[in-house]
Amino acid sequence: MQTSMKADLFEAPDYYHLDDLLSDEHKLVRSACREWVKREVSPVIEDFAQRAEFPEKLLGGLAEIGAFGPYIPEAYGGAGLDQISYGLIMQEIERGDSGIRSTASVQSSLVMYPIWKYGTEAQKKKYLPGLAEGKLMGCFGLTEPDHGSNPGGMTTTFRDMGDHLLLNGAKMWISNAPFADLAIVWAKNEEGRVYGLIAERGMEGFTTPETHNKWSLRASATGELIFDNVKVPKENLLPEKSGLGAPLGCLDSARYGIAWGAIGAAMDCYDTALRYARERIQFGKPIAATQLQQKKLAEMITEITKAQLLTWRLGVLRNEDRATSAQISMAKRNNVEMALRIAREARQVLGAMGITGEYSIMRHMMNLESVITYEGTHDIHLLITGADITGFGAFK
Amino acid sequence: MKILVCISHVPDTTSKINFADSDTRFDTNGVQFVINPNDEFGLTRAMWFKEKQGASVTVVNVGGPETEPTLRKALAIGADEAIRVNAQPEDGFFVASQLAKVVEDGGYDLVIAGRESIDYNGGMVPGMLASLTGANFINTCIGLEIEGSEATATREIDGGKETVKCALPLIIGGQKGLVEESDLRIPNMRGIMMARQKKLTVTEAAEAPGRTSVVKFEKPAPKGEVKLVSPDKLDELIDLLHNEAKVI
């Protein structure tokens, strides 16, 4: 495996002195993650992405730094940090790569969160410490081949067989699926009510084929979950919440993390483009001295600053348990599109160099094509805002 | 074993340095601060002693409240408690005098200071501290082992290394080599949470007037413009080096 000899020179922009809104502890959380990403992720990530391989060796580091369930209480192996800390961790990891952030997001918000919020005390004790330590890895199965934006139409079902539950169906586009030890699977019971079940690798009839040939999140493992008459013990049902609101509650947490993560990707693209534009000489002067490049860079920092304010405020609302799903949709939608546009503009600033793996920009750009689609598409989030302000749902 | 690690709060090496008040004061606006790298090597070695041989690790800094995040980071990495002597570090003698009081009050077996801080590069504090407390002193330390009440230290000397033994209590001026850069620890989230509960004691400064004062800071002269000379015009290059740069 090749490691990049190029130093990671990243310097985070803070145009509006938003650091003043953060506590010393937030800044320590952020600097620790930034240091870890510079030391462990930046030197290897391009090579893994080029080879479309998940860097499993980073799992131990993610666990050690505390990226798995940072807001889960200490009693269950988490760090008990607040929501802004969680956001900053996601921002810094995605600054390295969205695929690595996705792994941490899924483990924290889509696996640990539902066990913590909807599970029994026995389930929490059984799974959460191992998940926090990265000894157990999880994935989350909601999306199906024929049900993406409409998860309520899911056809995965389970039947009560007396001494066990019988699970049948298939899930698609599942991050972490190929290596996960367990899956939080959302399925309907005989009355059509959605519940979460914990399926474990090794259960007969449960397979996780890998999805190949992605042009996006290449350093992340994606797969399917296939359940063919899988016998799931009854104690693996998450009993404390049912209905579509249960998985959507997990997605609120994950989407909140994505809103922060996208800022990380955008900052990396902006920082790279700014440095390149100052150094790249054409017509006898740095291209940063030309109006068209300045327009790109000025718009980038403006959009990053707006996104930072949006997520910081959303973090405060989350800490106070006041953030609505619609508010989270707005931040996820705005920030991911912002990051994608910045990645494309930054790519242009670098000219031909922007298409190579020498720079992180095109990797971020391709990653963000997934991020703008997963966990609620860009369009669906717009309709959530639309429904919220008008009172009319326009999904169907 | 009781270990005290002296921690300087210094600008990150990538910081842009500016001066204020007619170039008599370092302008800290917009500057990120870190644990002085020489001290961080020492802190990491102290953590090793704590984990492998059993030791308590206290960190100390002479500075205002703005230095507390740096001490919290040391606590998050694993130090047991922190002391901040509440005073602006006027000069090396002032800092050494404050630390001497902490060392005498705490009864430490081993005091690890960085060989020098990377901001003012005075390099005086560890030696002065040893002199003020009467402890043994080994400077430019690149390796340290402790067995019972005896220390074996490796020092960097001109053109080689020297291994010395001495009894505790000992003060060392440490640097890279005590541990390697790859051994430096990044605080994890649980460590950051635990640091919240750890004791950070603020003590008032002892009377010890500084003996030097800053008259003026100057930045290095800016780099001159680069002149590119084509490889087939060596005469022109020699002419420039001889007549313009006057180096040959």
Image (tube, rainbow, N blue to C red):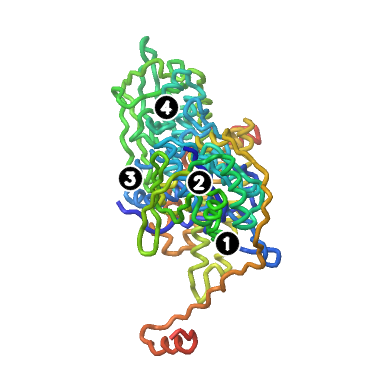
Q: Nearer the viewer, mark 2 or mark 3?
A: 2
Dot 2 corresponds to which residue?
B111
Could you tell me which chain the residue with mark 4 belongs to? A
Q: Position of residue A107 (x, y in %)?
A: 44, 33
Question: Is A206 or A132 nearer to us in this picture?
Answer: A132
> Given the image, what chain letter belongs to the residue carrying mark 3?
A
| Badge 4 amino acid | Ile
- Describe the element under mark 1 as helix, strand or loop: loop
Image depth: mark 1 or mark 2 in front: 2
**3D distance between C-alphas at marks 4 and 3:** 24 Å
Is residue B41 placed above or below A258 in the rendered structure?
below
Residue under numbered circle 3: A53
The residue to which callout 4 is attached is: A184
Tell me which numbered mark, 1 or 2, is placed earlier along the sequence.
1
* Marks 3/1: CA–CA distance: 39 Å
Q: Nearer the viewer, mark 3 or mark 1?
A: 1
Can residue B214 be seen here? The reply is yes
Place of residue A45 in the rendered image (x, y in percent of width and height, measured from the top left) = 38, 49
According to the picture, the residue beneath numbered tag 1 turns out to be B16
